[in-house]
């Protein structure tokens, strides 16, 4: 017996659903046994299916959150020196959480980039409003970006 997709490959394996002969190159292991690619119907989980509309929504929400939180961070931050670095972590959490809610908790690399850049924009806006750049500030920024991006993994 020969594989239905590869006529030169001999096999004794059949699809568990349609009984079509399949070779080891074609076989897809599923929880209910070996299947041919047609019967397995491999699709991505809905949480990882991010549409262009979701990306556009994420850009809008990310930019809005970045501008507003950056302005607040820049105004409040210089008055409270040590606390201002904790604001970076809070901004990262806020942008990550509200961004995740805005795209219905979807996940993906594109969303990670959008909201990571949003935290960076927030930091730049804070600098414009009076936040002073320091090594501790850069480390806090990295922590904020990590927190925001981790919501979309």
Image: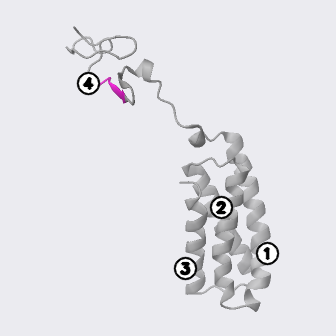
- Is 147 above or below relative to 99? below
Of residues 71 and 30, the one nearer the viewer is 30
> Residue 24: which disc?
4
State the residue position of label 1: 71
State the residue position of label 3: 139
Give x and y (percent) for residue 98: 72, 59
Tell whether label 4 touches label 2 (CB within 8 Å).
no
- Is 103 above or below relative to 44? below
The image quadrant of residue 89 is bottom right
Give x and y (percent) for residue 108: 56, 48
Q: Do we see residue 19 in this rendering?
A: yes
Few, some or many residues within 10 Å of mark 2 (<14, 14–19, 20+) = many
Of the image marks 1 and 3, the number of the one nearer the N terminus: 1
- Cα separation, mark 1 vs mark 3, equals 20 Å
Few, some or many residues within 10 Å of mark 3 (<14, 14–19, 20+) = few
The image quadrant of residue 19 is top left
Q: Give the structural element (helix, strand or loop) at label 4.
A: loop
Q: Nearer the viewer, mark 3 or mark 4?
A: 4
Span shown in magenta: 25-29
**Residue at left offset 65%, top offset 67%:** 93
Of the image marks 2 and 4, the number of the one nearer the N terminus: 4
Of the image marks 3 and 2, the number of the one nearer the N terminus: 2
Of residues 17 and 128, the one nearer the viewer is 17
Asked whether residue 46 is drawn in magenta, I would say no
**Residue at left offset 36%, top offset 27%:** 28
- Cα separation, mark 4 vs mark 1, equals 58 Å
> Residue 96: which disc?
2
Q: Going by the image, does 30 lie left or right of 144?
A: left
């Amino acid at each position: 017996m020969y594989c239905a997709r590869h006529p030169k490959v001999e096999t004794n394996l059949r699809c568990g659903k349609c009984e079509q002969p399949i070779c080891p190159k074609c076989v897809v292991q599923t929880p209910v046994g070996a299947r041919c690619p047609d019967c397995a119907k491999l699709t991505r989980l809905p949480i990882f299916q991010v549409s262009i509309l979701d990306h556009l929504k994420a850009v809008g929400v990310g930019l809005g959150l970045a501008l507003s939180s950056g302005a607040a961070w820049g105004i409040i931050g210089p008055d409270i020196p040590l606390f201002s670095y904790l604001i970076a972590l809070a901004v990262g959490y806020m942008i990550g959480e509200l961004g995740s809610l805005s795209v219905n908790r979807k996940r993906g690399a594109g969303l990670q980039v959008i909201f990571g850049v949003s935290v960076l924009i927030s930091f730049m806006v804070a600098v414009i409003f009076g936040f002073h750049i320091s090594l501790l500030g850069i480390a806090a920024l990295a922590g904020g970006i990590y927190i925001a991006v981790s919501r979309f993994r």
